[in-house]
Image (cartoon, rainbow, N blue to C red):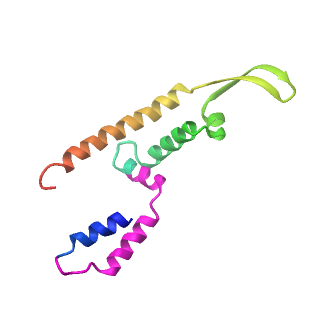
Amino acid sequence: MDLLLAAHAAAAPAGQVPALADDNAARKALRGLTYATIVRRAGELSKAGADATEAAWSMCSGLAHGDASATIGLLDTEVVQQVAPGISLTRVSAQVRLLVTATAIACGMTARAFQLLQERGRPPY
């Protein structure tokens, strides 16, 4: 936030102080910025769309962080052996179709990001 405001101040014409209202607007805009907001905005710029992109990100995030609900809800489980009451050996395996779909969304977003980088890096900046 401070870096943004410093850049805003540096961009003001010499001898002129940036308007306080502009600083307040910048603070307000950045306050509501979350990872989900960033992911949804990126999804809007991709073919997958905001909803599918957020769902894929949420799924991958849950799995990457070892979230129990993601593991149980997104992976196939098979009880192999009941060891004792309430205790079982369980085989956990990936749902390949689901993971391929999430990977395809991530690859599509990455390709789109590089395309936008190329487009927006050309003059005029």
Q: In terms of image quadrants, where is residue 77? A: top right
Camera-nearest residue between 52 and 93: 93
Camera-nearest residue between 77 and 24: 24
Can you give x and y, in whole percent of width and height, for residue 89 in the image?
Answer: 75, 22
| Left or right, 84 with reference to 111 | right
Can you give x and y, in whole percent of width and height, for residue 17 in the image?
Answer: 25, 80
Residue 80 versus residue 47 in the image, above or below: above
Which residue extends farthest left?
Answer: 123
Can you give x and y, in whole percent of width and height, for residue 68 in the image?
Answer: 66, 38
Residue 74 versus residue 55 in the image, above or below: above
Q: How many marks?
A: 0
| Left or right, 117 with reference to 109 | left
- Tell me what residue is drawn at x 39 percent, y 53 percent: 41
- Tell me what residue is drawn at x 35 percent, y 37 percent: 108
Which segment is the magenta one? 14-41
| Left or right, 88 with reference to 54 | right
Q: Main secondary structure of the magenta part?
A: helix
Camera-nearest residue between 49 and 38: 38
Residue 9 versus residue 110 in the image, above or below: below
Which quadrant holds the N terminus? bottom left
